[in-house]
Amino acid sequence: MHGDDATPALERTFSPWRLGALQLPHRVITGSMHTGLETLDDGGAALSAYYAERIRGGATLIITGGLAVNAEGCGADDFSVLGDPASDARFAAAAAAVHEAGGFIAAQLFHAGRYALLDGVTDAHGRPVHPVAPSPLAWRSAGAQVPVELDELGILRTIDDFRVAAERAVELGFDAVEIMASEGYLINQFCSPVTNRRDDEWGGDARRRRRFAVEVLRAVRRGVGFDVPVIVRMSGADLVPESSTQDETDALARDLVRAGADALNVGIGWHESKVPTVQAAVPHGVWLRYAEAVARAIALPSDPTAPTAVPVIASNRLTDLRDAEDILARGAITAVALARPFLADAAIVDRSRNGHFDAVNSCIGCNQACLDRSFVKQPVSCLVNPRAATETRYPLTLSAAPAHYAVVGGGPAGLIAAEDLAARGNRVTLFEADAHLGGQFTLAARIPTKEDYALTVAHYSARLSELGARVEVSHPVTVDELAEGGYAGVVVATGVRPRTVDIPGASLPHVLSYERAILDGVPEGRVAIIGGGGIGIDTAKFLVLSHDPAVRARAFEEQFQLASPSTYLESDALPQRTRVRERPGAAPFAPRPGSSVTVLRRTGKFGAGMGLTSRWVALGELREAGVQFVSDLDYRRITPEGVEVIFADGTSSLVPADVVIVCAGQVSHDPLSAGLAARGIRHEVVGGALDASRVDAVRATRQGIDAARRLAA
């Protein structure tokens, strides 16, 4: 499909294996992700293009986002239902596109259960539908309804709906199906004592709670026969208090194998869990222990280290195929499933196969353009790859009239503009005033949990070199120079500068901008941070969290009391790879006790503007570290002793501080556009240089590619 040669370092990853009746050439699956493209009224064009580009980049088997088996199983009104004519047409087109590109595709059979948000959703007869569940218990979410308890007839009908949906998927051209029984959805709800309070044949003890999952699998197997692989996405750990035990999870795995599963794909966590599972703060590979526990549970009794009775697939917080190789080489796991990494880089498989790891556009775990959008029912994309899920909007076709373009500024917006221009056959010169590329990502990569931002810069640097673009660092270009260069157009991506504050004492020597603090470090002592938005939160993380990923991984395990590593394995933890490129001259920094850091904010929520799925995690990290948060105040003055504040009731207080760090936002830095306009030079201003009122990296990278397309159609 994509060639047979693999770098020796990934020998296990690129070895063939069998998934039921399918022979697959390598062990990297494109895991399920709801994209929001599934219900677009475009005949499936966007979804087909998205899937096909990943197959062309080396993927072999794609598992779709959840396809509801009936209307009441929809996650929301942007989900598709198998059997709906319009949905079926879109997915038939997507399956055909995957096959034409040389790959395979599996339909994920989905029922949200009590997680369904069904306002506005109707059945085939136009009647409103309501969430259903094993017991009438609502979950903790705004807008969640108390679900209707399924009666015996409803349970049997739902089981048969899974069978009918599986049969329909095969008719549409799918090569396999995956039953979603994890992440807190309906089947998982039946398995858990937290959500299943029944005392009949479908609840009570653990065996009866497992019955629904087993009967769904049996029904699906009857429907598709043995020529179509059936994967079960089961929960390795719910991460919810008083939910299924490890022994119960092991028993479920064995029951599923006996009932005919061709593979077990091990998921982790529920949406309502207070344990983060997919954010950048989650250590790479930390969830492997649960997949390996499932593998141990179904291993042949005579040899617990031998291949398992059916393949076990590991997933969650795997972004690097070198880590996948480490996992697979240990023997318990047969394959890995990656979802967000395929958003970040459609060609992650081929680039890794060829040993071009620096060229991989790595998922940085930010969630800003994927999960954060999905939860508000917007189509997903990717901060570091704005073409993701927008392939029909940004086709990779050559410019109609290739020319020479200049890009000024090597931050995210400038890098993406330069890459897009060069990829479409244009000559590109990128000017960066600093000694290296990266812009705001250079600062971000210095923040604990955000080290992977440096990998984005590495990718675009490698990509520009591959495309023959000229990159000039330490070159603060002028309007005169740009005019003399004869460029067909200029992208101005000169970024932002820290905003200063008009507070008496702000010019004292112990008052630092966030940029200086992060790049140069902070003297020992008490710190007050002025500003509690995203920059203030990141600065606090810089001060109090360990800068050693391995130390943070151990702290994460202890904080959330994760299960012990599998006893028959030598080690459960992956090495926390250090592939981060430090800024030349940046000072090393050791964290100080969290109790010495106070974050101040005039009004509003701390971390306002941060991503929906990341804000609560970051604030939790800081509170765990002892950081103090004080709000609803005004600043009177800064003194050598600290920050004097006044509260709404008129009382005042001194926040003691040996160092004060100002995190009051940014201002645009654009020294070029006025001069370019005066000379009549075509140009586009993007990113923070255009608007620093709320610096948004997703918006900036989108502006970068849009500017490239406007200049060079």
Image: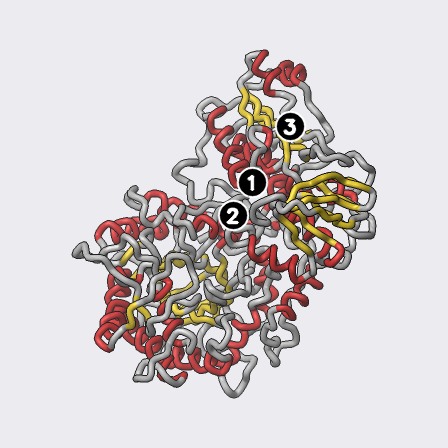
Q: CA distance from mark 3 to mark 2?
A: 24 Å
Q: Which residue is mark 1?
A: 697
Q: Is residue 37 left or right of residue 477?
A: left
Kind of element beneath mark 2? loop
**Residue 163, horizontal then vertical, whole percent:** 26, 69
Q: Is residue 187 left or right of residue 651?
A: left
Q: Residue at x 63, y 49 (%)?
A: 631
Report the residue that reaches farthest toward the top.
679
Residue 494 quadrant: top right
Residue 320 in sight in this render: no
- Neighbours of disc 2 within 10 Å: few (<14), some (14-19), many (20+): many
Residues at circles 3 and 1 in contact by the CB criterion of under 8 Å: no
Q: Is residue 703 left or right of residue 101?
A: right
Q: Which residue is mark 3?
A: 669
Q: Nearer the viewer, residue 461 or 664?
A: 664
For the C terminus, the quadrant is: top left
**Residue 266, horizontal then vertical, whole percent:** 47, 69
Q: Nearer the viewer, residue 678 or 12?
A: 678
In the rendered image, the vertical position of residue 683 relative to residue 292, given as above or below: above
Q: CA distance from mark 3 to mark 1?
A: 16 Å
> Amino acid under label 1?
Ala
> Amino acid under label 2?
Gln
Residues at circles 2 and 1 in contact by the CB criterion of under 8 Å: yes
Q: CA distance from mark 2 to mark 1?
A: 9 Å
